[in-house]
Image (cartoon, rainbow, N blue to C red):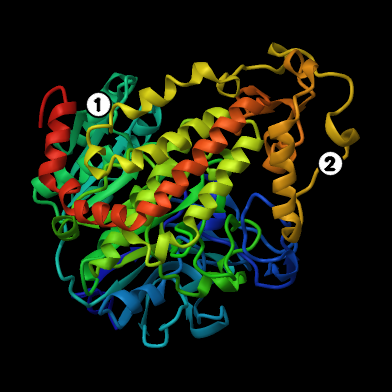
Amino acid sequence: MSVAEAAADWAVIQRVVLPTGSQVDTLPLYVDAGSASGIRLRENDELARSPKLPEDKLQMFSSGGPTVHFDDIDSRRSMTVRAGEQVSFGTYFNAFPASYWRRWTDVRSIRLEVTTRGDGTVMVNKSNARGSLQRVESVHVEGSATTVFDLTLAPFGDGGWYWFDLAAGHDGLVLESAQWTTAEAPRSHGQVTLEITTMNKPDFCLNNARILAANPEALENVKEILIVDQGTQKVRDEDGFADVSAALGSKLRIIDQGNLGGSGGFARGMYEAVQNGSDYALLLDDDVVVEPESILRMLAFADRCKNPTIVGGHMFDLHNRSVLHTFGEVVDPYRIVPSTPHADMEMRHDFSIANLRQTSWLHRRVDVDYNGWWMCMIPTAVIREIGLSLPLFIKWDDAEYGLRAREAGFATVSLPGAAVWHVSWLDKDDMVGWQSYYHERNRLITTLIHSPYPKGGRVLRESVQADVKHLVSMQYFTEHGRLEALKDIFKGPEQLHATLATKLPEINALRAQYADAQLKENVDDFPAPKIGRGPMGGTPIGLPRKKDLVSWGVKTVARQLVSSPDPSSAERPQTVLAHRDSRWFRLAHFDSVVVTNAEGTGMSWYRRDPKLLRSMLAESARLHLRLAREWDELGERYRASVAEITSMDAWKKTFEQHSPDGL
């Protein structure tokens, strides 16, 4: 078959790409070498929230095998394979996620076209949902050649990938390009509004605009690049903005808007995409680094989906770039918390240790409830039917939208091979501090709207437990925010738009009342700890056993309610705790302790206050009892309001009120 015949009427749906010179640490995501052999026992990390026991975490890995040489990468699409060596494109960014195309599109056959120069072998492989590797076809190549493989998607019902390997002969082999194509015509040739919501991160935001400007092919179907700037440090004032703006030309538009949070910024992107006639709104966080090829892949996939489908990209760790956050997320309906979808999957998988071919669970297709809005493409047909984001400011807006879409019959797909790099959640602790208000309020709102269980399943019980944990940990500012969230639930959905721009300043104004909210840069800014290491003679304090948890909690709360703190603890802390050691079951034993924040940028002095504990605990009990009594009525009230508060008209009024230049 000639190259011309192979190319006729076949559209590219995924190209092989390679990392740029500044992305050396991402190489394992694009290409690797060696075979899957050996086992590895994953280290147990209590912060990773992995559902598996350590003894169950047996992983395949390569031990001391050959490696890929970064200096053999010739361009974004080309690389040299040294004589006698073998490389594999069975990697996150370059394997073809066959099961996703099989499940969500009408595509049933594809072609792989591999253009090479030199002497060697092209080997095509596939896997099934269990991760079993299977050879499909092998072709010897010489000179300049384009090798074409016709491949079926029929056997990929539950999972599996296609990929190819290259083995070089005596004189080496050069991959000039490779691509996956299909003859299946798209249902549409969608146009995209690419929207970035930013708040005082102009450097990150401009960097992504620069990446996009350097990849014009990725912008071919992008109608508009929209930056919704909600900060005081403006993107247009950043050094280098003029050059990026000139490169993007008329595609770039900046909207200045008051700080309406992530939901306000992303809702503006949705609104503008509908208004300008785009087929999709592609939402991006500001503090990410995007793989621009993802845009082409998501669009090719979405254009061929059987029905309008939300298509999202995965998130890798910005500071450890071969580490995947999670392969897909669902919402536990009984608890209304995000979780990984299957017990055999892990959070924070490191592809530099165990690649795609060596990790069986990565071959099972993952069906999700939602995709984080770090990178998520939403059809405007979906927006027109179910509305825009709930006005939640931050937290739960993406998960709630995915649940709402699913109830309306629209699926979400987290598409492998499309991704951004973002700061890991493990480097943050947004359950403590001002964000605790939004975690509590928005989780309850999502539960009221979507929970299928009476009284929201376990949500109310877990809410009470969280209050107790924060209180015995002396996190009084955090608990004040959670109590405010409970009070605001009773004010109903009607006030959500009105408080979008005002609630955060109100919460921050409370900081002055609480010592635990006062952040100082250095440990020397506090009095030196007393001699000794606090309670129990310095013995490490572990998590109580599950069967002892209730009795432990009763005793701990009782002790904190009735016993007075050591008088000297008001003058000097008992000790200093690193952030990872400041767990609630340890903090509960102290009267006074200095704690480092999650980012490592400062620390706060926690001091026990029995009077404050009593008043807040009583307030929590009162509010939760009221919430349980009024749950059904509140649920009906919130569900009835969704269509109105997420409507184009409701958001238009909010945008007009908080946009200095209007709409």
Q: Is residue 91 above or below residue 532?
A: below
* Secondary-structure class at tag 1: loop
Q: Quadrant of the N terminus?
A: bottom left
Task: First in sequence, mark 2 or 1: give its number.
Answer: 1
Residue at figure coordinates x 13%, y 52% from the top left: 278
Residue at figure coordinates x 58%, y 39% from the top left: 427
Residue, far bottom = 154
**Marks 2 and 1 in Cβ contact (< 8 Å):** no
CA separation in Å, label 2 and label 1: 47 Å
Residue 416 visible? no
Query: Residue 225: which quarter of the image?
Result: top left
Q: What's the residue type where badge 2 is placed?
A: Pro
- Residue 299 relative to residue 141: left or right: left
Residue at figure coordinates x 77%, y 15% from the top left: 572
Query: Residue 473: which quarter of the image?
Result: top right
Q: Is residue 360 above or below residue 348?
A: below
Viewer-nearest of labels 2 and 1? Answer: 2
Local crowd size for mark 1, using a 10 Å CA cut-off: few (<14), some (14–19), many (≥20): many
- Residue 417 relative to residue 326: left or right: left
In this view of the protein, which residue sits in the foreground, 75 or 45? 45
* Secondary-structure class at tag 2: loop
Identify the residue position indicated by label 2 in the image.
Answer: 540
Identify the residue position indicated by label 1 in the image.
Answer: 258
Q: What's the residue type where badge 1 is placed?
A: Gly
